Image: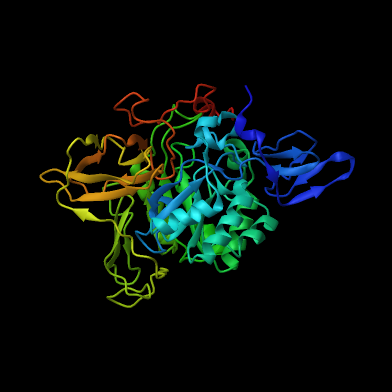
């Protein structure tokens, strides 16, 4: 049965019309050359009626309120709220993809699609007092037209644009992004060209060239590397990535070494051992990178920011929660005045009304306990009525409970937001909603994961790999034996 979501489309950018009815797409380095009716590698761009079209304009996964740390961005407005917007399709095909259900177009179901216009994205960010719109999850490259239109409107409204990407993109496409994007969080998966060919169906050099291009344009850039167990979680990977940063960019660019969880075609793996991540961080610091972080790691100090001069703590982080403790308004250490390379723009204050008690008469309660490596949850709410409704949540600590936080919903509004564990003594969360309100909870496996399955649909208690489980061919045993993908 054909996917309904592919039945509507609109004109795409970066089109080259060739002889004999051929059309070439210049969005990614694949430069797909297509005939009438064909789709590109990404599955969301193709040729219809003799022109290059995009099939995912105004089509997204559910927009979600998160924090800027979710996007491996630690040096721009720490703790700031963001509106995370993801879409469908991808210009790569990583065998370990954490979002394969939506990144690989052939697996996308019509039920996964949330229709969201540029105007609605900007209006939502403004109403929710979220100063940053982030283009994220599967990968924003293939959402090019929608992002340019949305980012332009966002700038006009005084909002900041963040682009979280594996950055398999052409220089022409980057040139179109540069006037509109403020922050680039780029995933450099390895410095080994053979790794890219074997595990991502892409090439390394365009990623490096694109990263140099946005850095030279003066944009805020942070880099991350996913350290896959027994494949790329090596000292060599850490050294090569850090060396490239020092040689091609500079030592003040923040670098994140990120913990892997088994997923997609690599479920027979294990999470990256934390000592290997710690060693990667040590290597990068010893080589001269000033700001090195571990991602998807809790209960360690390695997501905090410390002054490279006097070692004072500047920002403390627990999971996806951040609090500035030692920075002045210019992003310098308050102790020794050393530049810590932060951008601290004036942003709208994130207002979340709180109270010690609420009226829970006839309300529906939901409790979620943190377990294993599950330290975040997406809460999805829908108000099916014609009247405003309010939901509430609070954090449950070992010996007490936090204040109730208010989440208002307009009539017919659907809203999703993240709650991430904020302290070591926090056991879980409690959510209270009116009986008319619809509620779903989704376990989040690490910060880059967009869950599509609710906890009611998945077996309880697991924290190794998320659902849905890919039922096709696995790559892990082949990777270990050297047979390739």
In the image, 401 versus 355, the foreground residue is 355
Report how many numbered discs are placed on residues in the image.
0
Q: Residue at x 41, y 41 (%)?
A: 412
Which x, y percent locates residue 67?
37, 53
Q: Quadrant of the C terminus?
A: top right
In the image, 321 versus 276, the foreground residue is 321
In the image, 81 versus 355, the foreground residue is 355
Which x, y percent locates residue 466?
40, 31
Taking the image as shown, residue 13 lies to the left or right of residue 143, namely: right
Taking the image as shown, residue 125 lies to the left or right of residue 408, namely: right
Q: Quadrant of residue 56?
A: top right
Which x, y percent locates residue 383?
36, 40
Q: Pick out the residue farthest to the right.
A: 20
Q: Residue at x 67, y 37 (%)?
A: 41
Residue 73 showing in the rendered view: no
Which x, y percent locates residue 365?
22, 35
């Amino acid at each position: 049965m054909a996917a309904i979501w592919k039945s509507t489309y609109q004109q795409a950018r970066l089109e080259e019309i060739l002889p004999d009815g051929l059309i070439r797409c210049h969005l990614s380095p694949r430069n797909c050359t297509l005939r009438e009716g064909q789709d590109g590698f990404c599955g969301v761009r193709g040729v219809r009626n003799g022109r290059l079209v995009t099939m995912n304009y105004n089509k997204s996964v559910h927009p979600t309120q998160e924090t800027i740390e979710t996007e491996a961005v630690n040096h721009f407005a720490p703790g700031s709220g963001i509106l995370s917007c993801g879409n469908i399709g991808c210009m790569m095909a990583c065998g370990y993809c954490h979002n394969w259900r939506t990144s690989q177009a052939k697996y996308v179901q019509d039920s996964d699609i949330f229709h969201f216009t540029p105007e609605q994205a900007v209006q939502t960010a403004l109403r929710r007092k979220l100063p940053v719109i982030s283009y994220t999850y599967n990968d924003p490259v293939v959402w090019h037209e929608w992002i340019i239109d949305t980012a332009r409107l966002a700038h006009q409204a005084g909002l900041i644009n963040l682009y979280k990407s594996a950055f398999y993109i052409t220089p022409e496409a980057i040139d179109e992004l540069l006037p509109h994007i403020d922050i680039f969080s780029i995933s450099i998966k390895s410095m080994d060209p053979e790794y890219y060919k074997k595990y991502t169906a892409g090439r390394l050099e365009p990623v490096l060239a694109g990263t140099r291009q946005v850095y030279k344009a003066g944009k805020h850039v942070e880099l991350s590397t996913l350290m896959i167990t027994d494949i790329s979680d090596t000292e060599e990977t850490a050294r090569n990535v850090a060396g490239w940063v020092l040689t091609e960019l500079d030592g003040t660019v923040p670098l994140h070494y990120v913990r892997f969880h088994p997923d997609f075609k690599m479920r027979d793996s294990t999470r990256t051992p934390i000592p290997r991540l710690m060693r990667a961080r040590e290597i990068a610091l010893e080589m001269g990178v000033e700001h090195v972080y571990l991602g998807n790691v809790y209960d360690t100090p390695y997501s905090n920011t410390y002054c490279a001069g006097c070692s004072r703590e500047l920002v403390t982080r627990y999971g996806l929660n951040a609090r500035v403790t030692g920075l002045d308004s210019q992003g310098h250490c308050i102790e020794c005045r050393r530049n810590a390379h932060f951008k601290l723009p004036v942003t709208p204050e994130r207002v979340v009304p709180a109270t010690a008690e609420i009226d829970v008469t006839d309300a529906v309660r939901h409790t979620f306990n943190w377990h294993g490596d599950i330290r975040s949850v997406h809460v999805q709410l829908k108000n099916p009525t014609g009247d405003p409704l309010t939901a509430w949540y609070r954090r449950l600590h070992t010996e007490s409970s936090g204040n109730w936080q208010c989440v208002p919903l307009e009539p017919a509004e659907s809203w999703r937001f993240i709650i991430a564990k904020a302290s070591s003594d926090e056991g879980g969360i409690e959510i209270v909603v009116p009986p008319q309100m619809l509620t779903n909870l989704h376990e989040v496996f690490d910060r880059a994961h967009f869950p599509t399955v609710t906890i009611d649909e998945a077996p309880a208690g697991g924290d190794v790999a998320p659902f849905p489980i890919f039922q096709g061919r696995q790559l892990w045993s082949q990777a270990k034996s050297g047979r390739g993908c």
